[in-house]
């Protein structure tokens, strides 16, 4: 049985969407079943907002892990922040990816409330994949 990952992250620019697709492909090649919201709906259509929210919430509740892209300057994307908080409240493990090198201060790379929700924070994709594989091997024993 494949582990289901909900890939949360900003998706409002072409660069963000391309990064998310590349990241999903890497996770998929490593044996994960990945749900990427941007591939499932058309954004900007107000009549679908309620249905989109309901669909994503149902999928989020079914996934085993959340992987959150936490780039974007000093603050993470607001939708991603909500998904992280929701997953944390449900006890779903959250693995963060922060390739953005900007920091709040000398000790914090992201907002404290987001950082404290995370199971692990990686600074590159390769590290994150290694940690996911290592964590899942432990949890399957």
Image: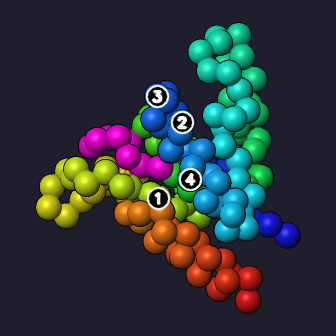
Decide which of 59, 37 is in the foreground and name it.
Answer: 37
Instruction: Identify the secondary structure beneath mark 1.
Output: strand
**Distance CA(mark 1)–CA(mark 2):** 17 Å
Residue where numbered disc 3 is placed: 13
Please name the residue shown 54% across and 36% down the image: 17
Dot 1 crowding, Cα within 10 Å, few <14, some 14–19, many 20+:
many
Quarter of the image where the N terminus is located: bottom right
Q: Quadrant of residue 8?
A: top right
**Contact check, label 1 and label 4, Cβ < 8 Å:** no
Q: Quadrant of residue 30?
A: bottom right
Q: Whole-percent x and y of residue 105?
A: 15, 55
Residue where numbered disc 2 is placed: 17
Read off the magenta span: 69-76
Residue 140 vertical placement versus 3 (above, below):
below
Instruction: Identify the secondary structure beneath mark 4.
Output: helix
Q: Nearer the viewer, mark 1 or mark 4?
A: 4
- Choose the circle earlier in sequence order: 3 or 4: 3
**Distance CA(mark 3)–CA(mark 4):** 15 Å
Please name the residue shown 77% across and 41% down the image: 58
Residue where numbered disc 1 is placed: 96
**Distance CA(mark 2)–CA(mark 3):** 6 Å
Residue 1 vertical placement versus 73 (above, below):
below
Residue where numbered disc 4 is placed: 23
């Amino acid at each position: 049985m494949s582990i289901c990952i909900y890939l949360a992250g900003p998706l409002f620019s072409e660069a963000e969407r391309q990064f998310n697709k590349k990241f999903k492909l890497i996770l998929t090649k490593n044996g994960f079943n990945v749900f990427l919201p941007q591939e499932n709906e058309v954004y900007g259509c107000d009549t679908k907002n309620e249905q989109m929210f309901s669909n994503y919430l149902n999928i989020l509740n079914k996934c085993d892990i959340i992987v959150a892209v936490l780039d974007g300057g000093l603050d993470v994307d607001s939708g991603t922040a909500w998904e992280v908080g929701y997953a944390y409240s449900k006890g779903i493990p959250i693995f963060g990816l922060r390739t953005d090198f900007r920091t709040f201060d000398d000790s914090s790379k992201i907002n404290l409330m987001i950082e404290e929700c995370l199971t692990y924070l990686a600074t590159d994709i390769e590290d994150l994949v290694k940690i996911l594989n290592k964590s899942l091997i432990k949890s399957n024993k």
